[in-house]
Amino acid sequence: MGKAEDTKNRIERAALTLFVARGVTATTTKEIALAAGIAEGTIYRHFATKEAMAEELFLRVHTAIAQELDKAQRAKSTMKDKARAIVQTYCAAADSDWLLFSYHLLSQHQHMMQVNSAHANPVAVVREIVRKAMAAGEIPKRDIDVVTAMALGVVLQPAVHKVYGRIGSALSDHVETLAEGVWAALCGKAPKPLRLPKA
């Protein structure tokens, strides 16, 4: 890694830490520079603005997850296996760089308006998988966007809990449980009724 690349990496990691802790708006370039151990002006050799850096970091992980999801699902033939591949891909992305994944998760509302059809999009990948499975009769035909949101929520809501310290282990430790939840969401299976002992 060259000096310029090393400096850019330090800036990004410092920014990510602050963005996750305080949000992009509340974080200043002065704070990023201090955390990275550089002069504030050095940031502008690598990024036009703080906002441009925030968007670049978001799109980097957003695009990477989409590409990995598409690659993983193409290697599977059944919807159930594709659903598990979706879970494994998200968990692997989270566990390989939790800071970057956390930032992506927490800053979606800020950046999703900048995502357009030119960008690979995880939601679009999963939606297409769901659409094809419904068309093939592998899962019940229902509102595609609602079902896509439900399937993604099974994985992403536990990730939010991990951000706030409610889950301490790696997400990959829970692949089987999450995959079962995604499959249930896709198939519209209701939970089994709780049977209470007779008094």
Image: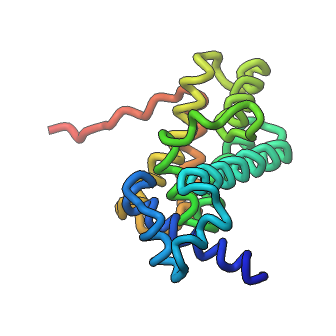
Is 6 or 175 nearer to us in this picture?
A: 6
Q: Which residue lies furthest to the left in this view?
A: 199
Asked if residue 79 lies left or right of residue 75, the reply is left
What colour-coding does the image apply?
rainbow
Please determine whether, in this image, residue 120 is positioned above or below residue 186: below
Asked if residue 178 lies left or right of residue 67, the reply is left
Is 11 or 57 nearer to us in this picture?
A: 11
Please determine whether, in this image, residue 78 is positioned above or below residue 190: below
Asked if residue 81 lies left or right of residue 41, the reply is right
Q: In which quarter of the image is residue 197?
A: top left
Q: Where is residue 26 in the image (x, y as percent from the top left)?
A: 37, 56
Q: Position of residue 187 (x, y in %)?
A: 59, 28
Please tell me which residue is depicted at 67% across the width and 67% down the height of the picture. Answer: 45
Please determine whether, in this image, residue 93 is positioned above or below residue 111: below
Please tell me which residue is depicted at 64% across the width and 60% down the height of the picture. Answer: 47
Q: In which quarter of the image is the N terminus?
A: bottom right
